[in-house]
Image (spheres, rainbow, N blue to C red):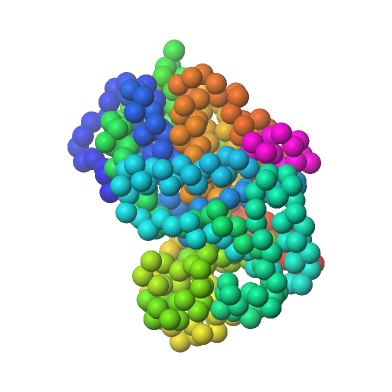
Amino acid sequence: MPGDSPQVPLPEKVDVAIAGGGYTGLSAARTLAKQGAMVAVLEAETIGWGASSRNGGMSLTGLKVAMQTIISKYGRPLARQLFQCSLDSILLVEEIIREEHIDCGFARTGHLIVANKPKHMDALAAEVDFIQKEFNHTVRLVSRDKLQDEIGSTLYFGGLVDEASGGLNPAQYVAGLARAAARAGAQLFEKARVSKIERNGTSIRLETNRGVVSADKVLVATAGYTGAATPSLRRKIIPIGSYIIATAPLPPELAHSLSPHNRMIFDFKHILNYFRLSADHRMIFGGRAAFFPETERTVRRSAEILRREMVQVYPQLANTPIEYVWGGTLDFAFDQMTHVGEQDGMVYILGYAGHGVAMATYLGKTVAEAILAGTLKDHPFAAFPFQGIPLYNGNPWLALPMAGLWHHFLDWIE
């Protein structure tokens, strides 16, 4: 992973300082540096340390929030813009991987949403017509009697296939994106945790444990790790853990029977499971097994829960060993939308809600372009308010128990 020696001093002044060395920050840094800007990426840990390397590697169409809801809240023109952004984000990932020769196993194998209950099929059937009519995008329904062509499980009642989505190895991708940003001229600084950001005359001063940097512009790209340096933004984000297990490599025949087309698969629940095959035929199985941010305890506990969930989906894997388990922390806004804007002199991109692989790459690029052009207010993801709720101070240990109970209740009543 491209990084620097802790002995290398930080620059005194840059055009843009970026807090966060994940997909968003690295994509923005690559774009800014290619346009001649002097850029410093300040990463609290190591480049790609957070959920950018510890996720399921799914590049998906659409947003976390249902497009019907987005139309009703924000209108049809903006909804169409946002949906197109999701399609363009996957194209951009594909383009960067090709241009920068990133070996990360990217493949457009599509995604499959599976119905946990019969009534979910009514919603998926309506989705097929809605997506075609509103966005001229083709998805197709899979009936229960045809579902064995898509997944080697009898647990579900049908599904929906979107061929446009893809998958990749997230750690290999973020490492390649970092190398691309460095080649473009961006400076990447590890173990440079930003502790304070304040305006200093016409520039912005960032204090880190490695020294001080002044910048004309600051981009906050800290996602689920948004912290005390940006308290006003921290109060608008709930950090939620997402956890993943990986089996030992499976025999090719078994792997093919579990997922004949190697789709990105996820279910219809509020507390969902998501799973796919890796390039070496491991089953990668993830979910919100524990809502809290990752710790050694939550990772260990989540592995037990996810194994039970996996065997429920795939009894064929009951005796298959689990070789790896990991967790990453996602960033959820209270409205579950992704937000772009400027606050207290800082540009921010936050709230991916588990849809960050492609969208973070895309927003890093397009927001960087908007910074250079002075058109941030015109960005489609800046067109709706980014609000917190009263009394929430950014402490997930207060908010997450209630959020977990609420989503379990929603799954129960459905």
User: In the image, what residue occupies the spot 79% across and 64% down?
Assistant: 122
| Any part of residue 153 in sight | yes
Position of the C terminus, as image quadrant, is: bottom right
User: Residue 366 at x, y = what percent?
Assistant: 49, 32
User: Residue 283 at x, y = what percent?
Assistant: 45, 72
> Most extreme residue toward the top, as rendered?
201
Between 89 and 32, the one lying in front of the other is 89
| Any part of residue 221 in sight | no
Q: Is residue 265 magenta?
A: no
Question: Which SS type dominates the magenta stretch?
Answer: helix
- The mark total stands at 0
Say above or below: 266 vs 212. below
Say above or below: 13 vs 222. above
User: Residue 379 at x, y = what percent?
Assistant: 58, 28
User: Residue 261 at x, y = what percent?
Assistant: 51, 68
Q: Is residue 81 magenta?
A: yes
Q: With 276 as the anchor, is 98 left or right in this view?
A: left
Say above or below: 411 vs 388. below
User: In the image, what residue occupies the spot 27% across and 26% down?
Assistant: 11
Where are the magenta residues, as a range?
70-82
Between 226 and 358, the one lying in front of the other is 358
Between 332 and 314, the one lying in front of the other is 314
